[in-house]
Image (cartoon, rainbow, N blue to C red):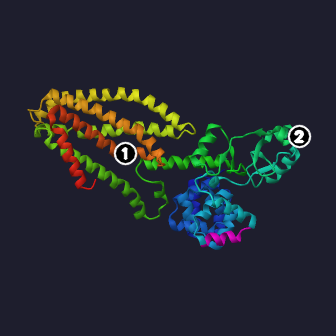
Amino acid sequence: MRQSVEQILEDVRAALDHSDSGLLAAQLAEVHPADLADIYSVLNDEQRSQLVFLLPPPATAALIAELDEAERSEAVEDIDTANLSEVVTELEPDDAADVLSELTDEQRVYVLEQLPDEQSDRLEELLEFDEESAGGIMTPKLVALPHTAKVKEAVDAVRQAAEAADVHYVYTVDDKGRLVGLVQLRQLVTNRDETSLASISVADPVVVHVDDDQEDVANKMRKYDLTTVPVIDGAGRLRGQITHDDVLDIAEEEAAEDIYLMAGTAPEELEEPSSFRAASIRLRWLLACMIGTAISGIIVGGFNRAVPHEVYIALVMFVPMMGAMGGNSGIQISTIIIRSLATGDLASTKVRLTIAREIPITLIMAPCCGAAATIITFLGLPFLKSWGMVDDSVPQILMTVAVGSGMTVAILTASMLGMTLPYLFRKLGVDPAIASGPIVTTTNDIVSVLSYFVIGSLILGGVQTPSVLKDALDVAVAFGL
């Protein structure tokens, strides 16, 4: 009966406590690498180092292949440079290239010198590509034959490569190595030995280029329901293939990256072993938000002279509601727009369609929220006056109209930001997920509060608003904002 991961963890800890490599090897003999990666993630630093030290190179390689980037970096640091070449030899080429990219130049040169020339040349080729591009995640292990080859040759090639490569197709190439087509394995089984591959191959298959971003690769494979996609260079030469398991890793990595950005941090935070450096990554976002809230405060204070003091106090009481509603509505729409931007080749067209859908929704939501704010203000203002929180001289009808109108305009302006900023960020080459992070949420708060006070001052304070806006701007400039 298969042990649970919890039971294996207890046994591993006991073996590590006694530094018993034999016992550890016996316990892990039947453990799946994915379970071993789970165990590694909950061990302390000392136990992790012991585990990597005691594991044989094949087991270490299997473990590294299952770890995320941050844990993989830590594991590689614990491997002696002299043994690292043995571990790299056991890894798939794309995983080996990832490990090598994290080494110092001296370590990388040493490890490559220990490898067979063919493997070393292959890895050096992979290291030329960006690690988040198709070339960086592909594996050069595949079966490729001249398009003039016969079925029998293809079957023999598949048999020889079956243990070393993940074979889904036999690729056909011309005399310059350019991809011509691909043959599905079932075609090899159902055709005679002397049948030409050219006659049964799929011409003009879906491909990706070595420089394509990994997220675009994942989108294309999902769109066309592919288990494997060939990778070509600018000249059309076949360079490698990307398999479905690589795409699952990409999807998880990209989703995690978007979540971190939307939460106001960065993916590299988890790669930082230092708490101080991890805190610095979060702080740079939070401090930017602090500046934004300071601007909101300047705006609120700047309108102090736009209306009578008692009216100003009444307006200030509804500022949190305006800021929160504006920020929330902006997040809702920006999240939907970001999702549209992540849907592949027709992202721009889909965004336009999404915006066309969101505009009437916003035009319904804004007045509904305005009406709700109007009702809340109309019913709540008498109680606030009776509790002494609002002066009796504040005109109830005008105050109600000011809050309701301000809410409507705040929702409209924040929604427009939510629609346009993600698209603008993408055009500027910035990850659109940032448009749902705290910085843009703070921007929505600023716009919402400003809209609310402009409307409220115009309704309750007459013509003094423009000069107040100038005063507020002068204060902002004085603070260097």
Could you say which is closer to the camera, residue 272 or residue 470?
470
The part of the chain drawn in magenta is 106-116
Q: Is residue 84 above or below residue 92?
A: below
Q: Nearer the viewer, residue 225 or 163?
A: 225
Q: Find the distance from the CA under tag 2 to the CA under tag 1.
A: 61 Å
Residue 369 image position (x, y, % from top left): 30, 29
Residue 115 in the magenta stretch? The answer is yes
First reached walking from the N terminus: tag 2 or tag 1: 2
Residue furthest to the right: 194
Amino acid beneath label 2: Thr
Q: Nearer the viewer, residue 301 or 71?
A: 301
Residue 440 is tagged as 1
Q: Residue furthest left?
A: 393
Q: Residues within 10 Å of mark 2 (few under 14, many from 20)?
A: some
Q: Residue at x 45, y 41 (%)?
A: 423
Q: Are marks 2 and 1 in contact (CB under 8 Å)?
A: no
On screen, residue 417 versus residue 117, left or right, reads left
Number of the label disc, if any, that sits on residue 338: none
Q: Position of residue 410 (x, y in %)?
A: 30, 35
Other residues around mark 1 within 10 Å, as few (<14) / some (14–19) / many (≥20): many
Q: From the image, tell me which residue sits under label 2.
A: 195
Q: Is residue 209 magenta?
A: no
Amino acid type for the residue under numbered disc 1 = Val
